[in-house]
Amino acid sequence: MKTKQSISIVFAVLIFTAGCAYTNRTAAMNSWMGSHISTVIQSWGPPTQITPDGAGGYIYIWRPTPMVLPPLSPYATAYEHNQHTLRQITVQAHNSSYKMFYARADGIVYHWRAQ
């Protein structure tokens, strides 16, 4: 019985912590709404990518840099078979997280997305 209570408490703490992290990220991203994109760039550094938003403004995207895994790591070694030749290739670890700010033509941030 005590084990079930412990598991329930741990689960509740994890849910609360995840909720707080989401709330903190949302508050942080919302704090840039109405700011000029140059202010965001001064704080975060240059974006990884800039693309038109289709409404005259731009989408500024920040993605983490892919990380090359150490050569002796079992996850860093892959093999490519090409016309009877087997050669070792380097594998990079990718992170699917991103942060985007949508800015109008005048540079004012009007929307954001993050993962």
Image: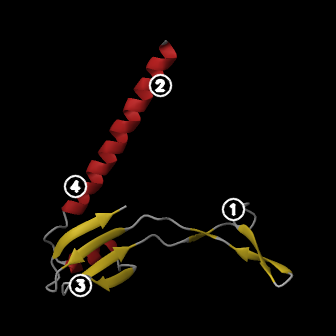
Secondary structure under badge 3? loop
Residue farthest along the right direction in this orientation: 84
* N-terminal label among 1 and 2: 2
Residue 6, horizontal then vertical, whole percent? 46, 21
Determine whether label 4 and label 2 are within 8 Å by CB.
no
Label 4 vs label 3: CA separation? 26 Å
Q: Which residue is mark 1?
A: 75
Given this view, does label 1 or label 3 mark the residue nearer the observer? 3
Residue ID at (44%, 18%): 5
Residue 93, horizontal then vertical, whole percent? 59, 66
Marker disc for residue 7: 2
Quarter residue 62 falls in:
bottom left
- Nearer to me, 62 or 39: 62
Label 1 vs label 2: CA separation? 32 Å
Secondary structure under badge 4? helix
Q: In the shown orientation, is residue 7 left or right of residue 29?
A: right
Q: Which residue is mark 3?
A: 54
Tag 4: amino acid: Ala
Q: Which residue is mark 4?
A: 27
Quadrant of the image for the C terminus? bottom left
- Nearer to me, 15 or 73: 15
Given this view, does label 3 or label 2 mark the residue nearer the observer? 3
Label 1 vs label 3: CA separation? 39 Å
Count of marks placed on residues: 4
Residue 107, horizontal then vertical, whole percent? 17, 82
